[in-house]
Image (tube, rainbow, N blue to C red):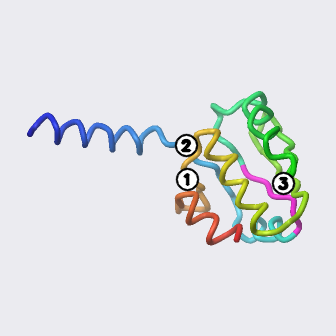
Amino acid sequence: MKSLLFSSVFVLVGFFCFSQEAIITDSEVFKKSVVDGNISMTLPSEITNDDVQKYSKYYTAFFTTAFDSKSHQVTFNMVNNDAKSRRVIIRFLSANGIQFARIGDSALPLSDFYDTYLN
């Protein structure tokens, strides 16, 4: 029983310690970018240009991406700027191992991030 409890705690701690976040510095600017269809955020430093290109090629019907490898800023240029197309951004972030979006002091799970900012 102790080993089961220890294993569960170990997995949960590992999950939260190693989870990656996309960072949005200003929520008001971000909301305007969603309306404009040019959505920008900063990705974790572990994500490379190759990662962005590898995963974004599957979603070209929904958006194109521009990635600045120095600042790790990615910009999604929406083909059709609607809620369905913006939901695909969540798939892209998940494929890159990102589980949360940090906006100011709060970190939102991607599903809550979509409901609050992209829907």
Please provide percent x and percent y for residue 86: 76, 61
Mark 3 and mark 1 lie on one chain; the one further toward the N terminus is 3
Side (left or right) of 119 relative to 69 = left
Residue drawn 86% across the image and 46% down it: 60
What residue type is disc 2 on? Answer: Gln
Q: Label 2: few (<14), some or many (≥20) within 10 Å?
A: many
User: Which residue carries the number 2 mark?
Assistant: 20
Tag 3–tag 2 contact (CB < 8 Å):
no
Circle on res. 62 = 3
Q: How many marks?
A: 3
The quarter of the rendered structure image containing the N terminus is top left
Please provide percent x and percent y for residue 56: 79, 41
Query: In this view of the protein, which residue sits in the foreground, 117 or 30?
Result: 117
What's drawn in magenta, residue-wise?
36-41
The quarter of the rendered structure image containing the C terminus is bottom right
What residue type is disc 3 on? Answer: Phe
User: Which residue carries the number 1 mark?
Assistant: 100
